Image (cartoon, rainbow, N blue to C red):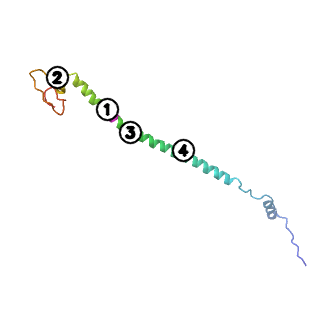
């Protein structure tokens, strides 16, 4: 004798039938969305790294430009001092006499020193 199972027709069994008929949708696109999100974050981080590298190179260029500016400004001040000294007639006479004997006067003795840039009062 085989026993037969009689199904009850109540609210609980109707809910169970509806669950079986409408299964929970599988998340098929979740992996694709995850891959796209990873790609977007990696692109953003790559652009951030590139901008950091360019910033680093710009800082290095700025430092070298500052050093070059300082050396050029020192040269400019030296040249300005030389120009102002060349405008002084006493200095020009001393400078011309220090180059050689041909610019000295006949009764004058010229001694050469290491530095021909002597001030107008005879001291450095």
Is there a contact, CB below 8 Å, between mark 4 and mark 1? Answer: no
Instruction: Name the foreground residue: 55 vs 110.
Output: 110
Q: In the rendered structure, which segment of residues is drawn in magenta?
A: 69-73
Q: Is residue 18 positioned above or below 98 on the image? A: below
- Picture quadrant where residue 83 is located: top left
Residue 50 in the image: x percent, y percent?
Answer: 51, 44
Say whether disc 4 or disc 1 marks the residue closer to the N-terminus: 4
Say whether disc 4 or disc 2 marks the residue closer to the N-terminus: 4
Residue depth check, mark 4 versus mark 1: number of the one nearer the observer = 1
Whether residue 49 sits left or right of residue 94 in the image: it is right
Say whether disc 3 or disc 2 marks the residue closer to the N-terminus: 3
- Picture quadrant where residue 80 is located: top left
Q: Is residue 62 positioned above or below 90 on the image? A: below
Residue depth check, mark 4 versus mark 2: number of the one nearer the observer = 2
Label 4: how many residues lie within 10 Å, few (<14), some (14-19) or many (20+)? Answer: few
Residue 110 in the image: x percent, y percent?
Answer: 12, 27
Residue depth check, mark 2 versus mark 1: number of the one nearer the observer = 2
Mark 2 sits on what residue? Answer: 102
Say whether disc 3 or disc 1 marks the residue closer to the N-terminus: 3
- Tag 2, which secondary structure? helix
Say whether disc 2 or disc 1 marks the residue closer to the N-terminus: 1
Whether residue 27 sits left or right of residue 63 in the image: it is right
């Amino acid at each position: 004798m085989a026993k037969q199972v009689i199904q009850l027709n109540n609210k609980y069994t109707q809910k169970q039938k509806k669950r079986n008929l409408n299964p929970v949708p599988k998340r098929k696109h979740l992996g694709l969305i995850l891959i796209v999100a990873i790609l977007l974050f990696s692109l953003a981080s790559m652009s951030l790294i590139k901008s950091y590298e360019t910033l680093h190179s710009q800082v290095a260029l700025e430092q070298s430009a500052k050093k070059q500016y300082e050396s050029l400004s020192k040269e400019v001040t030296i040249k300005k001092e030389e120009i102002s000294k060349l405008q002084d007639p006493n200095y020009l006479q001393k400078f011309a006499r220090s180059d050689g004997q041909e610019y000295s006067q006949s009764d004058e003795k010229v001694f050469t020193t290491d530095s021909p840039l002597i001030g107008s009062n005879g001291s450095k």
